[in-house]
Amino acid sequence: MSAKIVVVEDEEDILELIEYNLTKEGYEVIGFLNTKSVEQMLGEESVDLLIMDRNLPGVEGSEFVQALRKDGFITPVIYLSAKSQESDIEEGFMRGADDYITKPFNMKELLLRIKAILRRTSKKVEEGVLAYRDLVLNKSSRTLSVEGKDVDVTKLEFNLLCEFILNKNSVLDRDYLLENVWDGAEEYQYKTVNVAINRLKEKIDPHKSKNYIQTVRGIGYKLC
């Protein structure tokens, strides 16, 4: 499955150029001319990379990212900015950058840096770290953090959340969950799945404001 990349750039011709080249490379690209709808979108969808201009209308790009980081946003960020002084670049990294490219920029270099970051972050998953929105599961230590705070979950709840994150773009029916989380044990029924998911939702979203797991009526559940 291709990586999903969000690009925030207020110059429309540059945004279109980036979107065209990234799409040609096989990425799914979502472009914005400002940050107005970006935070809501990031809360609703899982993305693999954020490319952010700094000179934006309304809010400075690195300040926007800094605020996201404080809320537990862990997705990699590349700043693509005309702010090119050494102090600007240092400030960008202090405000949550994983990489920093100055304008005017070389498209080939941007593509290579994107590939390098995505390769690094996908390796983290292989090494045992799963992340979705502000949920972070460490498979090695079997710990869960939500918005940077540790949350106690049972082994079953941990495995259930792992299954959802690994299949984040799919609706999982109860038969699938019984087979893959409960190992197909015959004594377990659909009600068992419903109760476990409700308990998990209560732990990761006690205020019912995040809606991480959505019920798909008549089918099963989906991470959203």
Image: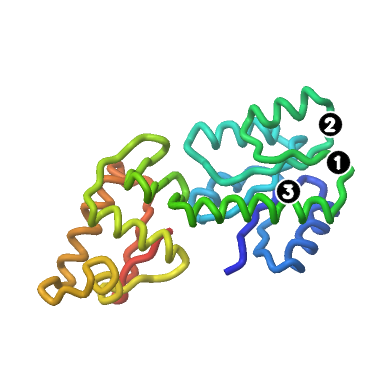
User: In the current view of this chain or complex, which residue is farthest to the top?
Assistant: 87
| Residue found 43% across the figure and 52% down from its top | 128
User: In the current view of this chain or complex, which residue is farthest to the right?
Assistant: 104
Give the CA separation, mark 3 to mark 1.
17 Å
Q: Which residue is mark 3?
A: 33
| Residue found 82% across the figure and 51% down from its top | 109
**Mark 3 surroundings: few (<14), some (14-19) or many (≥20) residues within 10 A:** some
> Is 221 situated left or right of 99 in this image?
left
Percent from the top left, x then y, of residue 137?
Answer: 39, 48
Percent from the top left, x then y, of residue 132?
Answer: 46, 52
Asked whether disc 2 touches disc 1, contact meaning CB atoms under 8 Å apart, the reply is: yes
Asked whether disc 3 touches disc 1, contact meaning CB atoms under 8 Å apart, the reply is: no
Q: Which residue is at the front of the view, 62 or 34?
A: 62
Sequence-wise first label, 2 or 3: 3
Give the CA separation, mark 2 to mark 1.
8 Å
Q: In what element is the residue under mark 2?
A: loop
**Mark 2 surroundings: few (<14), some (14-19) or many (≥20) residues within 10 A:** some
> Is 37 situated left or right of 133 in this image?
right
Percent from the top left, x then y, of residue 7?
Answer: 70, 51
User: In the current view of this chain or complex, which residue is farthest to the left?
Assistant: 187
> Is 47 situated left or right of 223 in this image?
right
Q: Which residue is mark 1?
A: 103
Q: Which residue is mark 2?
A: 84
Name the residue type under label 3. Answer: Leu
Figure label count: 3
Name above or below for residue 176 compared with residue 10. below
Give the CA separation, mark 2 to mark 3.
21 Å
| Residue found 79% across the figure and 38% down from its top | 81
Q: Which residue is at the front of the view, 185 or 76?
A: 185
Q: Which residue is at the front of the view, 42 or 1?
A: 1
* Circle 3 or circle 1, nearest the eye: 1
